[in-house]
Image (cartoon, coloured by chain):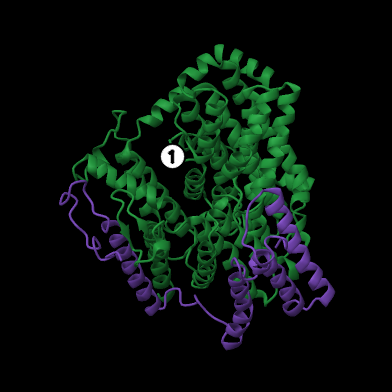
Amino acid sequence: MFDTRDGALPTSAAGVPGGLRGGWYPFWASAVMLMGGAVVMYQAARGIHADEGVFKGASGVLDLVRFVLPMLVATYLMSERLLGFYLASGAYTAYYSGVTARYRWYWAVAGGVGIAVATYLIFEVGFASLLPKSFLYFLTDGAFPF
Amino acid sequence: MEILGQLAGGFGTALQADNVLFLLAGCILGLIIGVLPGLGGTSGVAILLPVSVLITHEHSATTAVIFLAGIYWGALFGGVVTSILFNIPGEPWAVALLFDGYPLAKRKGKPGVALTSSFVASWVGAFFATVLLTFLAKELADIALQFGPAELFAVFVLSFATLIGLGAESPMKSVMMVAFGLLLAAVGFDTITGEPRLTFGQIGLLSGVNFVPVTIGLFGIGEIIASADEAGIGFVEQLSAKVGLKDILETLRALRSRIWLVIANGVIGFFFGSLPGHGATAGSFLGYGLARQWSRNKEEFGKGEISGIMAPQAAADAAGVGSLVPMLALGVPGSPTSAVLMAGLFIWGLQPGPLLFIDHPDFVWGLIASIYLGHLLTFLICLTAVPLLAMIMRAPHGFLTPFIVVISVIGAYSLNNDMKDVAVTVIFGLVGYWLRKMKYPLAPLVVALVLGDSTERELRKALIGSHGDWSVFITSTGNSGYPISGALIALAVVLLLIPLIGQLRRRRSGAAATTAHSA
């Protein structure tokens, strides 16, 4: 669609009217990053800041995935015509508090419903800030408010 | 003396019962709007602009502007609450508070001191800014107009220079983060030619990478992932938002030793805010960077240093006041919020600009007096009502983690009503976690992303004006006749060299110690 290579090479300031072309700025930003990266790699190779960037191993990574994956699924389901913002945030809260934090099921459900209703009242009713709705909202022509 | 008389008249107007009530209502509404993610001072003033029109049916335009300005002051205070307690900026200008506000609240266990420090700094900074507005509005507007592209570019370079080395053992990591931020800011339409760049054919990237979802991701989502990694899954530390007398006394003691820093940042923020188009966000970053440079405890920055809270907050609030200068004196909005306020002036049949001081002195001086009162009122409300606003912080951690995810999503989505911004937030949440793990400082990245567009625009405008002659940044005198740009660039170079010299000194003394030990 657009040729992103165009203007990606630096030109002399006086080479074009107006001094710099569009690629000058990102080119030099990338170049500085690259040079910085080379220095950091050199420092790492020489053992300077050797204590940095330690992971806890495979179990730590698995724990992280268990935490991040439901969050990613929930944010995806918040899209319009899927679960929508209110239902997905309610379901995520209920899942998180019930499954991850191991609260009793009725507290988890109450928390999920509470978050969904509270955000609806504050943003939709209070500030007329429209957030994505679920497929049920569209199926019922807005009769189902979430 | 004439000004004092006019100000006394302004207080007479602002202290009328209906004006005080509307000011109070505006401050409380602004505070709530500031605390809520996705709703800022600008959107709050815009949403309630029709209400101000209704107000003018029964009351004067002065009452209406006092109400709207109250919302702005309330939002300036309220935006800090989520920054300090959740690590999620409620407002763009509260981003700089993430660097030390949250660490002071979480790591040092002093959320009350963190909150009161920001409120006190807001009030003191705004007070001095309002004094400047009272006496120097016209003169400062003239000076601001003397800043050309070269001078503005030099100001931005100075902002970056103050942040190099921030929070990282390796200044090179800070340099990389600044470059990364500038690169992200370059995505989308070229600000000068309008050509798309770095979009890889994606229409969604044409409008560029907005810093709000990036910041929410880096700090909000990134932090809870890091918490889960460090303290175990499902764990988000609960912070009490109670503000007690002990916190207030500790803050006042801290303020006593930092009073000049707060006042200086108030003055700098005010002047920065009065530069048309810049405003509170850039002012707060500059304030933070300067506080770090001036501090004797540089290594404490990023770990909960009170100066790192007071300085940016004083500068941000003062910049908010300063943004009214070009609006009142020249009819040019100094910030997005003052642009909405200016729209209100037109709706109420007032013409902003120099003649406003002559044709409608009651309006101008009523507004200025209400700034003194509005900040005092909001300050007092904050000290008493923050525990109520932040009751959610006492929620059990099983609800707190999903709640933080939910408000992060709202904050990102509300920007453009676009799920792509939510995707950006999530992606940068993971990036933020990774960078945190690798000990890259996040602050320089955010500052560069926020100021990147303006920096490039001013750089290229200056070079267009000089026909590609780079010496313009040293020799330019703007409209002032003084080489302001050269002086600022020289200062930036000095600030850049300081960490390098420090490192060399440390290395040399280390080598000397090793030699002495082996001898």
Q: Label the green chain with its letter.
A: B
From the top left corner, tell me how far across and down residue B15 is, in percent.
Answer: 71, 22
The extreme left residue here reads A15
From the top left corner, tell me how far across and down residue B247 is, in percent.
Answer: 74, 48
Query: Which amino acid type corresponds to the residue marked 1 in the rendered image?
Result: Gly
Foreground residue among B514 and B245: B245
Residue B156 sits above or below residue B355 on the image: below
Residue B112 sits above or below residue B14 on the image: below
Q: Left or right: A103 with respect to B81?
A: right
Kindly state the secondary structure of the residue where label 1 is placed.
loop
Read off the chain for label 1. Answer: B
Q: Label the purple chain with its letter.
A: A
Foreground residue among B307 and B101: B101
Residue appearing at x 78%, y 67% in the figure: A111
Label tally: 1
Q: Left or right: B277 with respect to A42?
A: right
Task: Write down the quadrant of residue A46 in the picture.
Answer: bottom left
Q: Is residue B467 visible?
A: yes
From the top left corner, tell me how far across and down residue B510 is, in percent.
Answer: 42, 67
Residue appearing at x 52%, y 73% in the figure: B437
Residue annotated with mark 1: B277
Residue appearing at x 61%, y 87% in the figure: A59
Task: Write down the quadrant of residue B332 in the picture.
Answer: top left
Q: Is residue B401 visible?
A: no
Q: Left or right: B214 with respect to B160?
A: right
Foreground residue among B362 and B292: B362
From the top left corner, tell me how far across and down residue A104 is, in percent.
Answer: 83, 77
Around disc 1, counting alpha carbons within 10 Å, would you say few (fewer than 14), some (14 to 19), or many (20 or more)? some
Which quadrant of the rendered structure holds the N terminus of chain B? top right
Which quadrant of the rendered structure holds the C terminus of chain B? bottom left
